[in-house]
Amino acid sequence: MRKLGYLLLLAGFLPPLQIGVAQTQPASEIHVRRLNPRTMSIPVLVHSVDPVYTVEARRAKYQGACVVSLIVDEQGNPQDIHVVRPIGMGLDEKAIEVVKQYKFKPATMKESGTPVSVQMNVEVSYRLY
């Protein structure tokens, strides 16, 4: 497994949403729950991919972090990915490409163990060493 130092999971405490852009289910069947650590476990990253620099950002020696919002569905796949805090120089698009390849252990209800869809934020860091 690759270093998870590139990623900081930020639990998004957002109200329940009806999201209709998931690729695996029709809009009427998707229900995203508000992430509540008291009643459910948070999604756990099990597979990540290192972010890739653009040529422009590498030449400018540009560093920073892009925050991406996503929904982790019941199968642990990222859905409805979009940038919340952009950093520019083409790195926002690269962050979305990287997050699409992530795989999570889905959030589950603590009482029943049932997997649920939750919305969360992920920070993708770009650092030159």
Image (cartoon, helix red, strand yellow):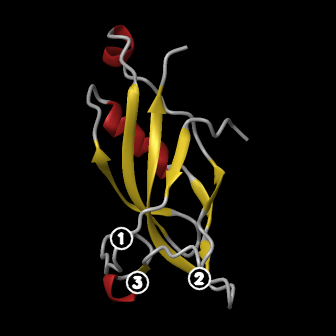
Q: Are marks 3 and 2 in contact (CB under 8 Å)?
A: no
Q: Nearer the viewer, residue 120 or 50?
A: 120
Location of mark 2 (residue): 39
Q: Are marks 1 and 2 in contact (CB under 8 Å)?
A: no
Q: Amino acid at mark 2?
A: Thr
State which mark lies toward you, 3 or 2: 2
Crowding near pointer 3: few (<14 within 10 Å), some, many (20+)? some
Location of mark 1 (residue): 14
CA gap, disc 1 and disc 3: 13 Å
Q: Position of residue 84 (x, y in %)?
A: 29, 50
Q: Amino acid at mark 1?
A: Leu
Residue depicted at 64% across the width and 40% down the height: 4
Q: Position of residue 25 (x, y in %)?
A: 42, 79
Mark 1 or mark 2: which comes first in sequence?
A: 1
Q: Is residue 55 above or below residue 10?
A: above
Q: Nearer the viewer, residue 54 or 42?
A: 42
Mark 1 or mark 3: which comes first in sequence?
A: 1
SS at mark 3 in the image? loop
CA gap, disc 1 and disc 2: 15 Å
Q: Position of residue 56 (x, y in %)?
A: 31, 16
Crowding near pointer 1: few (<14 within 10 Å), some, many (20+)? some
View extreme (right): residue: 1
Q: Which mark is residue 31?
A: 3
Residue 120: quadrant of the picture: bottom left
